[in-house]
Amino acid sequence: MRKSLFAGLRGATIVLLGSVALVGPSLAQQAPTEPWRERNLSFTGSYLSALVAESDQETEAAAGFLSRALARDPNDPILITQTFTSRLMDGEVSAGLPLARRLIQLDQASRFVLVTLALDELAHGNFDEAATFLARDVPTNDTFALVTNTLMLSWIKQGQGDTDGAI
């Protein structure tokens, strides 16, 4: 009796494992790998999903969900800032730069936005534009920001061929 019970359980286990092996891959293929691309996400659902993704350190998902929320409220400077920061954290600098430029247009650019734009201009050899971004927010009471701003301006002057001004 005991032998037939084990044989029955063993048979059921094999059937169960076999069905999981057959069904599992098809379920995995159906699961969306980028859930933020779903079309029916509400603003609230997108935003809350972004917060959860950020807390789980899922930067790609957070950036995607924030972009979906931003599509529903494109002029919210706080949301633009969060999406910009999330894009940079995910390594998508090229996706974050247009958001930084929108913040400039809305006159909502933080020092982080201005430095990011200045670095992008510096990388492309646009020294005057880089200096313009840095001049918009000259730090006065933040020693670290003052030092980094001065160093960046020195590199800009060096790039313009003004070595004496850089020193």
Image (spheres, helix red, strand yellow):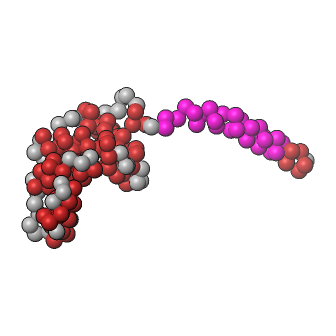
| Residue 136 percent across, percent down from the top left | 9, 53
- State the image coordinates of residue 2 (x, y, percent, origin top left): 89, 50
Q: Is residue 16 magenta?
A: yes
**Residue drawn at (12%, 50%) of the image:** 132
In this view, the residue in front, 142 or 25, is 142
17 in the magenta segment: yes
Q: Is residue 120 visible?
A: no
Taking the spot 73% from the left edge, 41% from the top edge, the residue there is 17
- Image quadrant holding the C terminus, namely bottom left
Q: Main secondary structure of the magenta part?
A: helix
Residue placed most toward the observer, 67 or 44? 67
> How many dots with numbers?
0
Observer-nearest residue: 78 or 133? 133
Can the viewer see residue 122?
A: yes
111 to 20, vertically: above or below: below
Q: Quadrant of residue 42?
A: top left
Q: Residue furthest bottom?
A: 143
Residue at screen point 10% across, 45% down: 107
- Toward which corner of the image does residue 160 lie, by quadrant? bottom left
User: Magenta residues?
Assistant: 8-33
Residue visible at 15% across and 47% down in the picture: 129
The image position of residue 140, as x and y in percent, is 8, 66
Q: Is residue 64 left or right of residue 133?
A: right
Horizontal relation, residue 34 to residue 114: left or right:
right
Q: Is residue 78 above or below residue 163?
A: above
The percent coordinates of residue 164 (x first, y second) are 14, 66
